[in-house]
Amino acid sequence: MNELLRTAIIVEHDVFAVRQRGREVAAAIGLEGQDQIRVATALSEVGRQLLARLGPVAVTFEAVTDPVDSLAVSASAPVPADGEVLKRLLTEIDGARRLMEAWRIDEAPDRVTVVMSRGLPANAPALTADRIAELRVELERLQPSQPVEEFVLQNQQLLAALQEVQGHRDQLLRLNEELEETNRGVMALYNELSAELEETNRGVVALYAELDDRSAKLRDASEAKTRFLANVSHEMRAPVTAILGLVRLITDPGSDPLTDEQRTQLDLIGGSAQDMLHRVNELLDLAKAESGRLEPVPTEVDLSAVFGALRGTMRSLVSRPEVEVVVEEPVGLPPLITDEVMLTQVLRNLMTNGIKFTLRGEVRLVARNAGGDRLHLVVSDTGIGIPADEQERVFEEFYQVRGGAHRGVVGTGLGLPYARSLVTLLGGELALTSTEGKGSTFTVSLPVRVPT
Ligand code: ADP
């Protein structure tokens, strides 16, 4: 126990003396001005109440070092016979609790003790054993002053406290004014912003109206184009079919004999007509897919069988020994319910492209479970690849990568847009990754069940 000073409150006058002691001890130990008054006030308030209700009060000042350096003051008085009295007393002194940092009530059978403490500020000298011994000597030398002096001092302290409160109030008023000023500024800014926002909003609304208008026009134009494609291809199919029929008739073994020259020319006419019919059919397919008149017919698809058929037809298309067609056997996949004809068309289309644009290496078809009820059907090749800036454009109608024709490859530029339309109809997506000179990979991501 590092007791610093012990004193008592026997009669009412002693309250003043003890208050003064409290302030002196607090000052000596290193507490700052406001805290000295807090300690003195708490102690005199507790002392006064204990004396009035319970009797003589023993007061002890102690230097505490654990957990932090602080001053502890305890005021102890005899326990009253009536428990109610103590209870009331403890509520009454509770107000003083706010003045101290720590506050404890010890109730022994015969005495009740209020222990209050406050920590020392960082700049106070540390409470070493030497320092505590020094404090004891210093405090012993202090003479108790007269109650009147303490009373005058107390009044001064009260005045000082009042001034501080007044100061706080002035500061509060100033802050309030500043706040009002700021509020006015914010309101002005807000009004300005609101006006600007309104203006912007009007602009956006107008822009949207224009956008809607343009979208409608674009839709109309797109529909007109689809109708045109459908009409033209339909109208062209009849004469082309007629040419083919006539060529077949003339070259029939039962018909009049032809010279070799005539036969060669007729074969050329037949070949061109066949080629034209193929292109016209492609146009018609695309027009149908885009017009929304094509509806998927979902059935459970035997992917293994589809792959088997593709393996056969695609291999027959390869004309170079340096190119291999690999169709991996699909395994471990969930049942697939989709339009088999459309799916086959898409895969055939992608693989034909792969074969067309691959000079050596392989064209590969793989099916993978993509999770989340989706399948990935991946067609990859080790061909010429597609430049990054043209990878989106190849899905546009009639688009062909620049320089493609020079490589002696023929086509219409309708295959990929058609494949993408079909995949969309099946509820999926068609994506492309490609590196020029290395190859391309087309991924058909399909739901395992075509949405209806
Ligand atoms: P087509 O093949 O009839 O020209 P597509 O729409 O199928 O039309 O393809 C458009 C263009 O995209 C092709 O002309 C070609 O330039 C490019 N392309 C398509 N597939 C591949 C591929 N696997 N490798 C390289 N280029 C490709």
Image (cartoon, grey):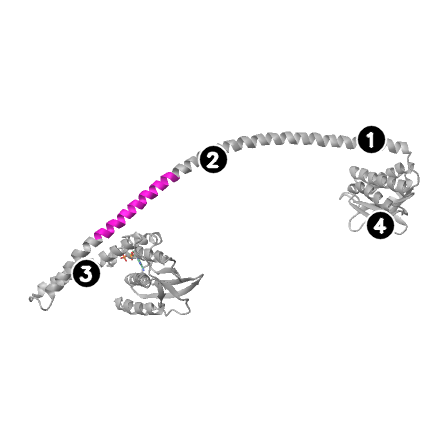
Can the viewer see residue 21? no
Farthest-out residue, right:
10
- Per the image, the residue denoted by label 3 is 274
Element at badge 2? Answer: helix
Report crowding for label 4: few under 14, some 14 to 19, many 20 or more residues within 10 A (C-alpha). few
Q: Is mark 2 within 8 Å of ligand 1?
A: no
| Alpha carbons under labels 1 and 2: distance apart | 60 Å
Viewer-nearest of discs 1 and 2: 2
> Depth-wise, is mark 1 or mark 4 nearer the camera?
4
**Mark 1 touches mark 4? (CB < 8 Å):** no
- Mark identifier at residue 106: 4
Local packing at callout 3 (Cα closer than 10 Å; few below 14, some 14-19, many 20+) is some
Residue 219 part of the magenta segment: yes
For the record, the magenta segment spans: 208-232
Residue at x 31%, y 43% (from the top left corner): 217
Task: Work out whether residue 218 or residue 301 is closer to the camera in this orientation and state it.
Answer: 301
Label 1 vs 4, first from the N-terminus? 4
Ligand 1 within 8 angstroms of badge 4 C-beta: no
Residue 450: x and y in percent read 38, 60
Q: Which residue is mark 2?
A: 197
Q: Secondary structure at mark 1?
A: helix
Residue designated by label 1? 156
Instruction: Decide if residue 186 is on the left or right side of residue 264.
Output: right
Determine if the magenta segment contains residue 44. Answer: no
Horizontal placement of 216 versus 44: left or right?
Answer: left
Mark 4–mark 3 distance (CA, rounded to whole Å): 110 Å
Instruction: Give 103 or 248, whichever is nearer the viewer.
Output: 248
SS label for mark 3: helix
Q: Label 1 near label 3: C-beta < 8 Å? A: no
Relative to 163, say whether 279 is above or below. below
Label total for image: 4
